[in-house]
Image: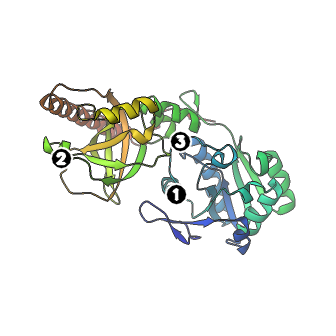
Amino acid sequence: MAILTFKSSYLFRRKCVYLETFYDATLGLLQRSSIALGFFDGVHPGHQFVIGAAVEEARRQKLVASVVTFKDHPRSLTQGSSPLLLTVIDQRLAQFEKLGVEAALVLNFTEELCRLTPAEYVKNILVEAMGAKFISVGYNHHFGRDREGNPKLLAELGKNLGFSVQVAPPIFVDGQEVSSSRIREAIVAGEMEVANRLLSRPYAIVGQVVSGDARGRSIGIPTANLATEEYQVIPARGVYVGTARLAKGEAMPAVINVGLRPTFASDKLKQEAASSGRDSSNLLVEAHILDFNENIYNQKLEVCFLKYLRKEQKFDSVAALKEQILSDCRQAGQYLQVEKSRSNATKGKPEHKLHA
């Protein structure tokens, strides 16, 4: 994927195009493409429907299956702040590739780009730069200055500019409409099983493993401390069953702690967290990988959250803490074994109801 790429991205050495201004896009990056258009935070089933339509049409017409998206959430510029993200750009690119996307154009949402009318945006970027012959969007997609553009206008522009448009309907899982905002709510509440059903995969955070104070190693339970992105959604404080994966590696069973490590946390850290509410920048994400004891400092690690185990708590002694962590590990191992057996038994069958 990412045949348009000039600048390296973050995870697993993928690449993508970054255009600082829309003038850069007048170079004519592609001649004939089928485009999925959107921010696609989370790349959930609703987004997958949009992208899948573009990929299918690309195969039918022998076009380049493409995505046009933004590096940062558009609201970061238009409203001064944006929601915390479910997926950083490299996670989105990885999901696009799995869905069959061949090229991704990642735009920086600048003031100049923000001033483009819907017609200018479509003509300059989607048609002249990307060679759009087919565009797939969600039913609630907006684009152009002041979000004036919508699917109806896009279809009208397509009649004159030579592309067709397909509009994806809302997608429902277990009776709930799938949306990035609903998934964020579930994650912040620690409802990982709900979030993962809506996402169609386990929620994951990627970060660099950084050195800590080696408290875990000192009691025989080493942990990998993650430097997380400050703008990514962090699950509710607590202990989770999950998995951990190094770049190009296999998923390994893990117990993940999100919080302050209250048995060891300093009074200053506790006060900072209390005064800031749920400020994820003050939360620690650390993973104990079961049956693993290698040095992975400075490596990228992806942790997936599968199930909330218990709330974070303070213990009277290090021995009591260690006993609880070992109990957490046993529970995690049992849960993962059951899930593996269930997955093998239901392989090829839908796990939940999904419909438009």
Q: Amino acid at mark 1?
A: Leu
Front-most of residues 229 and 205: 229
**Badge 3 is on which residue?**
84
> How many residues crowd mark 2 within 10 Å: few (<14), some (14–19), many (20+)?
few
Q: CA distance from mark 1 to mark 3?
A: 18 Å
Q: Quadrant of residue 108?
A: bottom right
> How many residues crowd mark 1 within 10 Å: few (<14), some (14–19), many (20+)?
many
Front-most of residues 219 and 106: 219
Residue 249 in view of the camera: yes
Count how many numbered circles sit on residues in the image. 3
151 lies above or below 354: below
Residue at (52% x, 57% y) in the render: 93
Q: Find residue 31 and report its horizontal and vertical position in percent.
A: 71, 72
Q: Quadrant of residue 316?
A: top left
Secondary structure state at the residue bearing disc 1: helix
Looking at the rendered image, the disc whose residue lies closer to the viewer, 2 or 3, is 3
* In the image: residue 136, left or right of residue 242: right
The numbered dot on residue 93 is 1
Q: Quadrant of residue 340?
A: top left
Which residue is most to the right?
A: 160
Q: Give yes or no for contact between labels 2 and 3 (Cβ–Cβ under 8 Å).
A: no
Q: CA distance from mark 2 to mark 1?
A: 31 Å
Q: Amino acid at mark 2?
A: Asp
**Badge 2 is on which residue?**
291
Which mark sits nearer the N-terminus, 1 or 3? 3
Residue at (68% x, 43% y) in the render: 79
Residue at (32% x, 52% y) in the render: 245
